[in-house]
Amino acid sequence: MEYGLIGEHLSHSFSAVIHKKIASYSYELKEVSPEELSGFMQEKAFKGINVTIPYKQAVIPYLDEIDETARQIGAVNTVVNRGGKLYGYNTDYYGMRELAEKIGVPLANKKVLILGTGGTSHTARAVANSLGAGEILTVSRHSSNDCITYEDAYNHHTDAEYIINTTPLGMFPYEDGSDHHKASPIDVSLFPNLQGVLDAVFNPLRTNLICEARMHGIAAEGGLYMLVAQAVVAAEKFLDTEFDKSIIQKIYNELRSEKENIVLIGMPGCGKSTVGKKLALALGRPFVDLDDEIVKKSHMTIPEIFERYGQTIFRQMEADIIRKKIASKSGAIIATGGGAILRNDNVLRLMRNGKLFFLDRPIENIRPTPDRPLAMDYNALKQRYDERYPRYCEVADCHIMTSENIDDTVSKIKEEFFS
């Protein structure tokens, strides 16, 4: 191949899409088993490659020269073939540094916890050092001279001000965890001094760790920006050139807007479905209505579900549809039911790949209808409105005051989403 990415499992990768946006060269994803790595590296049948889990340290013995930054970190994620000699670099270092600076919380003199012990962990430590962090602790499942355990972190280091996750926990396809791993590596609610959280995971756009941090008002960012920034620096190494660094933000914005869902939340009758359909048509995106999906799955109307099974069963159906069908969507317009945001797990799943827009329609402009079991008359509607309004405001990324002009509402959402 000409250029590409090697790793063991690459179904989650965005790298080919990113490199296509950087320059016009062929870039492939090549899954390499541990048994195949030696032969691949010795054959040198490439001009340049990126390297991901689990080979960032394993490729080092095959290199003729290693950049000083990569040598100090002890991990390589970019290899360039120059006349049969292999040169190793760590462009993750530049990507993570850009990511740290993006969230606007300086690391200088901060106490930093780095979760994980692999190659990216070493990169995170180098970045934290370069940005003047005061105390840096690596957190692992097992204690050693170089690491503390998660129990130690909870018992003795809840004064940490910054957390950087370099573990794969929360990564696609195990966003909700698995039989052997949790969905989030650490509970941010137990760190009252926390000011910033970074996660090297980029798929989903935001892991549970990032979503939970944001819900606590903490500046937090997933790994997509880091991925784009390191890819730009890698391309510079591949082509022996320099790009204007504004290309990082440009590609990040493009990729985020392509991958991210627009999630509409708000009261029954506020226009989520109507606005959503028009927005989907305007943007050429698929439209998904959560209530319609529940009806299809159950073969019953919403009032019939409430009458036969009650609200508790309906909410479980709703949560199951979000978990199994909605949360993994990419680039879609999603209209939720009025009460979908009442459960934290629903909100986390919708936030992972979505930007939540609260369509705020004054209650006097919302008409009660029989097909909404909890808002069939004005008194019920008013009660739901008073109960839920603070929650809509709390979880929304953007607050959109709607008007009778649907086109105006659609324009407001588009402007906010693409800004």
Image: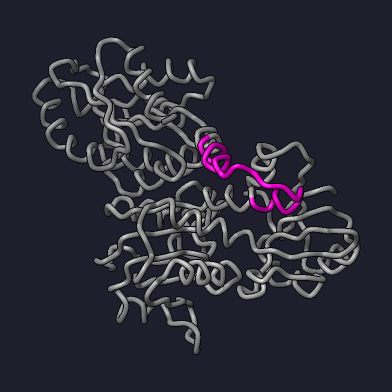
239 is within the stretch colored magenta: yes
Answer above or below: position of 158 versus 104. Answer: below
* Outermost residue toward the left in this view: 379
Residue 306: x %, y % from top left: 27, 32
For the residue pair 41 and 273, the one nearer the viewer reads as: 41
Horizontal relation, residue 43 to residue 129: left or right? right
**Image point 28% across, 63% down: which residue?**
189
**Image point 37% across, 48% down: which residue?**
348
Magenta residues span 233-253
Residue 358: x %, y % from top left: 28, 31
For the residue pair 136 and 165, the one nearer the viewer reads as: 136
* Quadrant (top left/top right/bottom left/bottom right) for the C terminus: top left
Horizontal relation, residue 310 to residue 293: left or right? left
**Image point 75% across, 36% down: which residue?**
24
**Image point 85% across, 54% down: which residue?**
46
Scheme by which the image is coloured: one colour
Answer above or below: position of 179 versus 159. Answer: above
Residue 34: x %, y % from top left: 77, 68
For the residue pair 47 and 321, the one nearer the viewer reads as: 47
The quadrant holding residue 346 is top left
